[in-house]
Image (cartoon, rainbow, N blue to C red):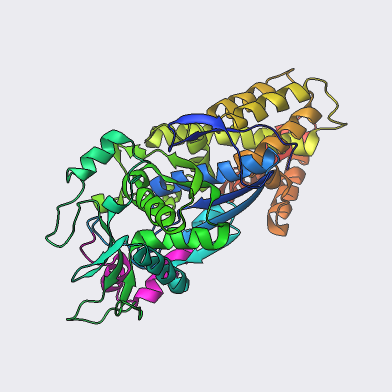
């Protein structure tokens, strides 16, 4: 964690950038909406998680002590935003032949594994909706006591007309559209088209795999109630930053605010931050569209998850990013060049990093991070620092080490990793072949090493290797 510096962030609630002010000086309570674990996540989902990881890293780098909470939605997220359709976990169970609990655990673990490959820092709390049913019931009871809910034949609903500020996250134009019924069809029992379920009753004609007793009857929580309940459970009734994808603004996060603020009478979150979509063929990538790319699909085509992370860093989180294989190839080339440079510096840079120009580059980099996470600007600073003559090699290494604490590309860690005994033996054999002028054997060994992800370069000082 570096020295503290003023941080300016764009707040969806105010539609403007402002210096970050936190509940407790120097500390940041951060809540990020996690996955609904009924299927694999696609790379569009992971663009949001990369943005949130950069935010967390950036806050820490600029001197803030971050406490990060993320939820796992393993119940209550229905296939329709109109509170109709099947629960996505029950649907996943029917699709796979596993129980809903097995589906949730399987896809939670794939998310955790993918996150490691993308160098996403694990949250301090990863909380599952199914582990917090009592907190959700308690929150609904508070809303009921204050007159914000009503009962229908299929559940307990939140009456959005009772909350004067409903829709403030969306802005006036969106709010009026919802009130006019633009969002969902108005069912006969709903008082307003924007009303939403906080508790759904189990169907009478079949038994659900995930259901609980409640004061209103057997059933399960609505999707939105979990985040309000768990965020306040771990971060307090008012906390600093809440993040998610831009698609959460109009419904999920709007409903979170309505629930939390109606129950407590206090502001729920100070700063709302939203990542823009990843587009493919000019359309939002979505599971509901029937086809999507996983990290595993990228790897099958020869790209690493960190190639994709680099691609995400090339666009500001509030700008849409067009995905194409050509763009990913460009990101791969740039990332390999950066990684190779880091490994060379790590193995060869000598002396201290006392270059007087180092502080200038560090300050410039910090300024880009502090200005609403300007990662394209931060990357440009990195490449400028690596230009010949910009800094001494020792200072370049020090700068890259510092910058990578935010970029999260694993540059110096990857550089410091040694080779396995088998690969080192191949490298030694190749060196001996070169000494013996057996260039055929040398080339064959170079090819073997390349297949194992180790690129060998011959220099005046002997052979040098880097990871691909």
Q: Is residue 24 above or below residue 355?
A: below
Q: Nearer the viewer, residue 314 or 432?
A: 314
Q: Nearer the viewer, residue 350 or 20?
A: 20
- Work out which residue is located at the far left of the displayed protein and give it: 188
Q: Is residue 29 above or below residue 168?
A: below
Whether 105 is among the magenta residues is yes
Please state, as top left, top right, bottom left or bottom right, where the N terminus lies in the image: top right
Query: What residue is rendered at 47% in x and 42% in y?
Result: 272
Q: Nearer the viewer, residue 35 or 341?
A: 35
Residue 173 is left or right of residue 375, and the answer is left
Residue 88 is left or right of residue 445, and the answer is left
Magenta range:
83-110
Q: Is residue 20 above or below residue 157?
A: above
- Work out which residue is located at the far front of the displayed protein and give it: 146
Q: What is the x, y in percent for residue 142? A: 41, 66
Q: Quadrant of residue 170?
A: top left
Q: Is residue 304 visible?
A: no
Q: What is the x, y in percent for residue 281? A: 28, 36
Query: What residue is rendered at 45% in x and 43% in y?
Result: 47
- Work out which residue is located at the far top of the displayed protein and give it: 389
Whether 369 is among the magenta residues is no
Residue 39 is left or right of residue 392, and the answer is left
Q: What is the x, y in percent for residue 131? A: 47, 72
Please state, as top left, top right, bottom left or bottom right, where the C terminus lies in the image: top right
Q: Main secondary structure of the magenta part?
A: helix
Residue 250 is left or right of residue 260, and the answer is left
Q: Is residue 48 visible?
A: yes
Q: Nearer the viewer, residue 422 or 324?
A: 324
């Amino acid at each position: 964690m570096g020295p503290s510096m003023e941080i300016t962030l764009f707040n969806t609630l105010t539609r403007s950038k402002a210096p970050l002010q936190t509940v407790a000086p120097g500390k940041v309570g951060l809540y990020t909406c996690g996955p609904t674990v009924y299927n694999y996540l696609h790379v569009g989902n992971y663009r949001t998680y990369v943005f949130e990881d950069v935010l967390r890293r950036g806050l820490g780098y600029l001197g803030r002590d971050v406490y990060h909470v993320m939820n796992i939605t393993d119940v209550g997220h229905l296939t329709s935003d109109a509170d109709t359709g099947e629960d996505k976990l029950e649907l996943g169970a029917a699709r796979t032949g596993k129980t809903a609990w097995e589906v949730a655990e399987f896809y939670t673990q794939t998310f955790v594994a993918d996150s490691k490959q993308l160098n996403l820092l694990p949250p301090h709390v990863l909380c599952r909706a199914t582990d917090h049913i009592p907190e959700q019931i308690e929150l609904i009871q508070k809303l009921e006591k204050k007159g914000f809910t009503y009962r229908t034949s299929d559940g307990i609903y939140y009456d959005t007309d009772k909350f004067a500020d409903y829709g403030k996250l969306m802005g006036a134009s969106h709010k009026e559209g919802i009130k006019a019924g633009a969002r969902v069809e108005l069912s006969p029992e709903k008082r307003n088209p924007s009303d939403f379920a906080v508790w759904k009753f189990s169907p009478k004609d079949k038994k659900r795999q995930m259901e609980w007793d409640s004061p209103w009857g057997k059933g399960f929580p609505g999707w939105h109630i979990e985040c309000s309940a768990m965020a306040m459970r771990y971060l307090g009734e008012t906390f600093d930053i809440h993040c998610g994808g831009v698609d959460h603004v109009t419904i999920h996060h709007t409903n979170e605010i309505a629930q939390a603020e109606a129950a407590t009478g206090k502001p729920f979150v100070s700063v709302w931050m939203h990542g823009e979509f990843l587009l493919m063929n000019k359309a939002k990538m979505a599971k509901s569209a029937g086809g999507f790319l996983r990290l595993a699909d990228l790897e099958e085509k020869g790209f690493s998850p960190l190639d994709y992370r680099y691609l995400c860093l090339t666009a500001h989180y509030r700008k849409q990013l067009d995905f194409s294989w050509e763009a990913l190839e460009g990101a791969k080339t740039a990332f390999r060049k950066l990684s190779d440079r880091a490994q060379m510096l790590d193995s060869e840079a000598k002396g201290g990093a006392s270059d007087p120009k180092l502080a200038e580059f560090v300050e410039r980099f910090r300024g880009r991070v502090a200005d609403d996470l300007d990662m394209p600007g931060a990357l440009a600073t990195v490449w400028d620092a690596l230009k010949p003559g910009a800094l001494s090699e020792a200072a370049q290494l020090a700068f890259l080490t510092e910058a990578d604490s935010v970029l999260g590309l694993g540059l110096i860690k990857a550089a410091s990793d040694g080779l396995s005994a088998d690969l080192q033996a191949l490298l030694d054999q190749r060196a001996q072949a070169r000494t013996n002028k057996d260039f055929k054997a040398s080339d064959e060994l170079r090819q073997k090493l390349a297949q194992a992800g180790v690129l060998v370069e011959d220099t005046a000082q002997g052979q040098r290797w880097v990871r691909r």
